[in-house]
Amino acid sequence: MALALHTGIAVEDWGLIPYEESWHRQRELLHRVQRREAPNTLVLCEHPTVITIGRTGSRQHVLLPEPLLRARGIPVFEVERGGDVTLHNPGQLVGYPIFRLSDYREDLHWFVREIEQCIIELLAEFGIIGHRIPGLTGVWVAGERKICAIGLHVSRWVSWHGFALNVNNRLEEFAYIVPCGIVDKGVTSIARERGAAVPLAEVKSLCADIFRRHFPESSSLR
């Protein structure tokens, strides 16, 4: 379901969707964007609890034993994105920017920094100061607590996979993993920093607006 029609990027809300289903839908959309049959598209969604391992990740960073993972119905996927181990669960805003970087800049480092800046601006709307840590990817609060993880893959200069912003999700479940393979820092969420839950629909709407400002033009279907 598209959130709105706009002259820039398209934004789609896939709701709460199993990770594997979103993975296949992303791949289909990726091919359509590569062929210029679809516009640059930001997908927003949530996932039931799932653990994913990126290209540089290690299964050793999944701390919950396999029998407990099965008993709790938590799948583990090894995927194409960069980065190590992360966890998605309900109340976390997951964003998949499926963009032709050649429409903007063929520079993955620049693209990651732009996504980080979008998240920093989004957090500011809730009175939270987010920042970067040199040498690490993602957005942090107060230096030690990660609030947004980023892991991308690029195929023919079209990006897929994306970011995971903790909003109202259960942070206790991050004890199942070593988040992003970083052992000496914690995680946080918008709700934890504010002391109260926030409407996820509001976060999605603000996120879409901020991404449109950063990526205002789409050369799709020209």
Image (tube, rainbow, N blue to C red):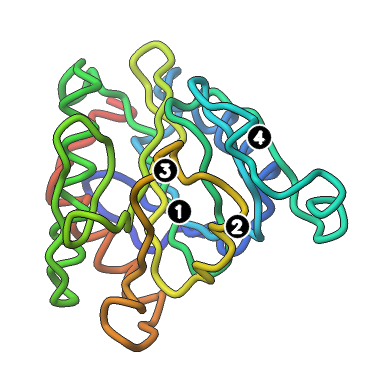
Q: Which marked residue is nearer to the observer: mark 3 or mark 2?
A: 3
Q: Which marked residue is nearer to the observer: mark 4 or mark 2?
A: 2
State which tag comes first along the sequence, 4 or 2: 4
Q: Which mark is residue 141?
A: none
Q: Are marks 3 and 2 in contact (CB under 8 Å)?
A: no
The amino acid on which the numbered mark 1 sits, given as a three-letter code, is Val
Could you give the CA–CA distance between mark 3 and mark 2, rounded to whole angstroms? Answer: 24 Å
Q: Are marks 4 and 1 in contact (CB under 8 Å)?
A: no
x, y percent for residue 197: 39, 85
Could you give the CA–CA distance between mark 3 and mark 1, rounded to whole angstroms? Answer: 23 Å
Residue lying furthest bottom: 196
The amino acid on which the numbered mark 4 sits, given as a three-letter code, is His
Compared with 91, 80 (above or below) is above
Could you give the CA–CA distance between mark 3 and mark 4, rounded to whole angstroms? Answer: 31 Å
x, y percent for residue 63: 65, 45
Q: Which residue is mark 1?
A: 94
Q: Which residue is mark 3?
A: 183
Q: Which mark is residue 47?
A: 2
State which tag comes first along the sequence, 3 or 2: 2
Q: Which quarter shows the C terminus? A: top left
Q: Are marks 1 and 2 in contact (CB under 8 Å)?
A: yes
Residue at image coords 25%, 21%: 108
Residue at image coords 12%, 65%: 129
x, y percent for residue 186: 37, 57
The local crowd at label 1, few if under 14, some if 14 to 19, many if 20 or more residues have their Cα within 10 Å, is many
Could you give the CA–CA distance between mark 4 and mark 2, rounded to whole angstroms? Answer: 14 Å
The local crowd at label 2, few if under 14, some if 14 to 19, many if 20 or more residues have their Cα within 10 Å, is many
State which tag comes first along the sequence, 3 or 4: 4
Q: Which residue is mark 4?
A: 24
Compared with 83, 165 (above or below) is below
The amino acid on which the numbered mark 3 sits, given as a three-letter code, is Val
The local crowd at label 3, few if under 14, some if 14 to 19, many if 20 or more residues have their Cα within 10 Å, is few
